[in-house]
Image: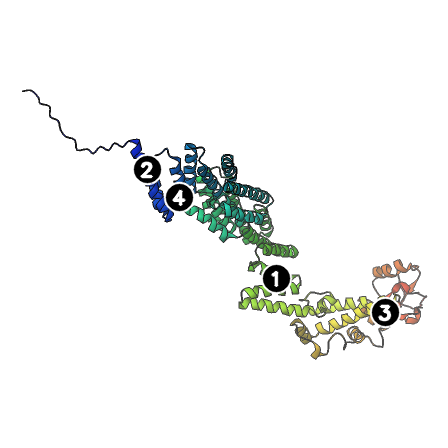
């Protein structure tokens, strides 16, 4: 049986449109897109322009219209691509060149924008829009040059100023935003820098520059571990990102040096800690917060090493970097107290107390104010040349020394000016001894109380001569010494005639060139000494003129 061929009907809708139908359909889509564009429904306008392009992909105006819509949707890179396609299809399409130039401007490419506007002016020299936009491109280029120069000079405020002006034109330029954010971070304006970087990352989570700026902000806020994570992420996105690589290396080095210094300090190895903090400070001068802490840490180590002036300087450096750093104010104030710069200490403690009104800070302030009040009086400890923890014996020894040093009879041959000054010092020594040798007065003085009630204000109630005689056991008027050798013993620790042989030889033979045949009795009467000034005889043995004194108890100086 022969096979029979059967025609099977195919259920297929075949739509074959000729080019004229396609162009007509594309034009309809374009008109619908224009309607939505007029209504500011840019999303629907974009859809219909896309349909028009699909129907007629060789029509330049459709790409131009869709580019305009994408610009309104702030999708500038896509708009740039459509504009470039439009002028590729029609090199004389002026609107296409204008839109391409505007996209370049918005994306921060001023030179490319200028080329586009120049092309429009070649086609239509009188085109005012192209002329104006070309001037804008030139202005943008100038701001770029100024910003580059400012960054090289580390004038970050100028860079931020220029980038603000540039972004008013090139609002979609990530490069300008990143540069601004970096400079904000370098200026310590971290929240602003973080905000700019975050805006970029919301649009492009893989942007290595934005990741770097986020890490930089954390790094400068002393959040080093988190900062390193962002630097590493930026390097994953862009392995050749040199700034991220350098910042990552600095962050790790800074953390290591700081931790080494802290450990050395805990181990009481202050010299090593001091040097480690110094090394850490050299790593990155731009890291304000971390360096402020390093300066304060070095000041603490310096104070332990008794480098108080250097410690004060370090605290001042820390405060310059971070004027809210309370710990630096407290450390500097303590150093001021230790160096008796009480006014400066009070100023720092006042600053601290105004910021943090705690009981501890109030106590520190009151103590500094008390020391300041005490410092404005005569410092009796300095007058006697002793420390504030001096014992009674040390105070007595100091008085003995200073009283003899400044006694007016010792300076009888000096000029009237010198005599007056020495008499003043002699009185101050007596005044200081009277207060510090009296337990009650000493306590009141140490506590900063006024001594008026004790009758010892400004030395007006002191008689230095009486104090001197009472201390040395003398008698008589004026400043003269008692003529007996016993008083001399009290003053100088030995009788002028009975000192040991070696001392006498040094004091008399050497200075007076006394002949060896001269003999002195241990206690001859003063008639044995010829001088016009008794005090000078006793105070200045060099003026003594010795006459032979015969007695059974002769002592020979050899």
User: Which circle marks residue 26 in the picture?
Assistant: 2
* Residue drawn at 6 percent across, 20 percent down: 2
* Residue drawn at 17 percent across, 33 percent down: 11
- Helix, strand or loop for disc 4: helix
In the rendered view of the protein, which quadrant contains the N terminus? top left
Identify the mark nearer the N-term, 1 or 4.
4
Quadrant position of residue 3: top left
Label 1 packing within 10 angstroms: few (<14), some (14-19), many (20+): many
- Helix, strand or loop for disc 3: helix
**Do tag 2 and tag 1 residues touch (Cβ < 8 Å)?**
no
Q: In this figure, which residue is indicated by the disc labeled 1?
A: 333
> Image height check: is 134 above or below 398?
above
Mark pair 3, 4: CA separation: 107 Å
Q: In this figure, which residue is indicated by the disc labeled 4?
A: 69
Foreground disc of the pair 3, 4: 4
Q: In this figure, which residue is indicated by the disc labeled 3?
A: 409
């Amino acid at each position: 049986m022969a096979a029979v061929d059967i025609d099977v009907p195919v259920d297929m809708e075949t739509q074959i449109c000729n080019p004229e139908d396609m162009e007509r359909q594309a034009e309809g889509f374009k008109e619908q897109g224009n309607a939505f564009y007029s209504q500011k429904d840019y999303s629907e306008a974009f859809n219909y322009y896309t349909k028009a392009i699909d129907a007629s992909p060789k029509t330049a105006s459709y790409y131009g219209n869709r580019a305009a819509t994408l610009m309104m949707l702030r999708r500038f890179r896509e708009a740039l691509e459509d504009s470039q396609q439009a002028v590729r299809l029609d090199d004389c399409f002026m609107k296409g060149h204008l839109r391409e130039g505007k996209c370049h401007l918005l994306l921060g490419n001023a030179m490319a924008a200028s080329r586009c506007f120049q092309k429009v002016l070649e086609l239509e020299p009188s085109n005012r829009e192209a002329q104006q936009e070309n001037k804008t491109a030139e202005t943008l280029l100038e701001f770029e040059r100024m910003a580059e120069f400012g960054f090289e000079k580390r004038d970050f405020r100028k860079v931020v100023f220029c980038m603000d002006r540039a972004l008013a034109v090139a609002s979609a330029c990530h490069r300008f935003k990143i540069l601004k954010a970096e400079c904000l971070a370098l200026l310590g304006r971290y929240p602003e820098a973080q905000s700019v970087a975050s805006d970029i990352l919301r649009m492009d989570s893989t942007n290595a520059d934005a990741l770097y700026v986020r890490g930089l902000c954390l790094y400068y806020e002393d959040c080093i571990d988190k900062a390193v994570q962002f630097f590493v992420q930026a390097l994953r996105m862009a392995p050749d990102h040199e700034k991220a690589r350098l910042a990552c290396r600095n962050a790790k080095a800074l953390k290591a040096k700081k931790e080494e210094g802290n450990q050395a300090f805990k181990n009481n190895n202050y010299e090593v800690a001091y040097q480690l903090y110094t090394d850490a400070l050299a790593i990155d001068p731009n890291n304000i917060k971390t360096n402020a802490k390093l300066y304060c840490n070095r000041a603490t180590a310096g104070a332990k090493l008794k480098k108080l002036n250097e410690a004060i300087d370090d605290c001042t450096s820390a405060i310059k970097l971070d004027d809210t750093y309370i710990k630096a104010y407290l450390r500097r104030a303590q150093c001021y107290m230790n160096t008796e710069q009480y006014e400066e200490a009070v100023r720092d403690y006042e600053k601290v107390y105004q910021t943090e009104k705690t009981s501890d800070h109030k106590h520190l302030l009151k103590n500094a104010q008390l020391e300041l009040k005490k410092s404005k009086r005569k410092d009796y400890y300095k007058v006697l040349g002793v420390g504030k923890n001096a014992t009674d014996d040390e105070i007595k020894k100091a008085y003995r020394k200073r009283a003899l040093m400044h006694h007016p009879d010792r300076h009888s041959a000096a000029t009237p000016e010198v005599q007056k000054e020495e008499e003043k010092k002699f009185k101050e020594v007596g005044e200081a001894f009277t207060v510090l040798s009296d337990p009650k007065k000493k306590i009141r003085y140490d506590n900063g109380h006024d001594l008026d009630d004790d009758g010892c204000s400004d030395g007006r109630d002191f008689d230095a001569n009486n104090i001197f005689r009472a201390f040395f056991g003398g008698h008589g008027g004026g400043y003269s010494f008692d003529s007996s050798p016993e008083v001399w013993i009290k003053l100088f620790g030995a009788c002028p005639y009975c000192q040991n042989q070696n001392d006498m030889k040094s004091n008399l033979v050497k200075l007076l060139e006394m002949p060896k045949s001269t003999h002195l009795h241990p206690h001859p009467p003063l008639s044995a000494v010829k001088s016009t000034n008794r005090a000078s005889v006793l105070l200045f043995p060099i003026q003594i003129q010795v006459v032979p004194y015969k007695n059974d108890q002769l002592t020979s100086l050899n």
